Amino acid sequence: MQRRSLLKNIGLLAGGFSLPVLSKGESLVATSPKRALRIAHLTDIHIQPHILAAHGLTKCLHQLQNLEIKPDLIFNGGDVVMGSRNVTKDKSEKEWALYHKVLQNENSLPVYTCVGNHDIWCQDHSVSAFESGKTRAMDQLQLTKPHYSFDQNGWHFIVLDSVQLKPDGSPYTAMLGEEQMDWLEKDLKKTSSETPVMVVSHIPILSACVFLDGENVKEGSWRVPGSWMHTDCAALVKLFHKHKNIKLAISGHIHLLDQVVYNDIAYCCNGAVCGDYWFGKTQETKAGYAVIDLFSDGSFTNNYHTYRWS
């Protein structure tokens, strides 16, 4: 990405690698694109009141706010709390209270969040319980809708809701659904083609690490659950291909680190703040967060930072 951006800046990618025509007195000088925004991507925090999770999140927030170049904002990728199904309401409320306490006391940056599957508290598999649990999570995260978009510093940001309940009430699947897909198509259509776009989801839209999350080869075939990667991946990839200004899509959920580039869009799965639920690393991925620099020309860098939480 850096090499491609450099070549673009000096004109080698335009017009079949032809050099620009200079007027008399002009010089050919490669200029670096201006950083538009620096983002910290924290995902899969999984706050738990009975272990060192609050201490770990505090250490993470302190580290990223003391970087030489401080981030402008935080994207929280979901699974804020351990929560999820079959926990008591009392335990769920303690987790949310602890998360809010740490954020209030230890963070000075604006936070934009999407809903993760663990944030949805429900004690049965009914549609009503699931929707009620998602509404409760949205209230905790101060969201009016589980999907939304906004513009900042010349970039357009789209936050998606990955977690949908299957019609039969069985565990969730990763997809947008008809209503959200229609909203996404309209949002992209009304966004200027000159405005670079970043997409945020809890569950990866496209990922390589989902194939390595457990023993997934059975009887000679891959078996990757629909809750690990978007089941509407093909439809999203097709939609994204129509919009050349989409530059990257970031996610979490798997607690592993990867980057897949497909049709010139980078899909970055950025590990987990909690590592392996606060008991070490997940396979080769240590607890950490990503720092994403977005530039005025639509280029970017996505770098993973580990930290010592214990």
Image (cartoon, rainbow, N blue to C red):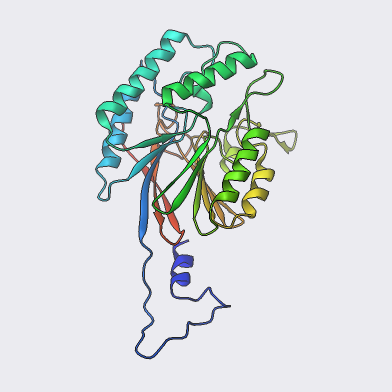
Q: Is 10 placed above or below 227 here?
A: below
Q: Is residue 266 left or right of residue 59?
A: right
Q: Residue at x 27, y 39 (%)?
A: 63
Which residue shows up at 43% across the image and 34% down it? 281
Q: Residue furthest front?
A: 190
* Residue 267 image offset from top left, x and y in percent: 54, 48
Q: Nearer the viewer, residue 229 or 15?
A: 15
Residue 123 is situated, as x and y percent measured from the top left of the image, at: 56, 11
106 or 189: nearer the viewer? 189
Residue at 26% x, 30% y: name it: 106
Question: Which part of the image, by quadrant, shows the C terminus?
Answer: top left
The picture quadrant where one finds residue 108 is top left
* 284 lies left or right of 175: left
From the top left corner, tell me how far across and down residue 252 is, in percent: 50, 37
Q: How many numbered dots are placed on residues in this image?
A: 0
Residue 222 visible in this rendered orientation of the protein: yes
Give the residue at the far bottom of this rendering: 24
- Residue 192: percent from left, percent from top: 53, 55
Q: Which residue shows up at 64% across the image and 54% down it?
A: 241
Q: Is residue 67 left or right of residue 40?
A: left
Whether residue 52 is visible to the viewer of this picture, yes or no, is: no
Residue 39 image-quadrant placement: top left
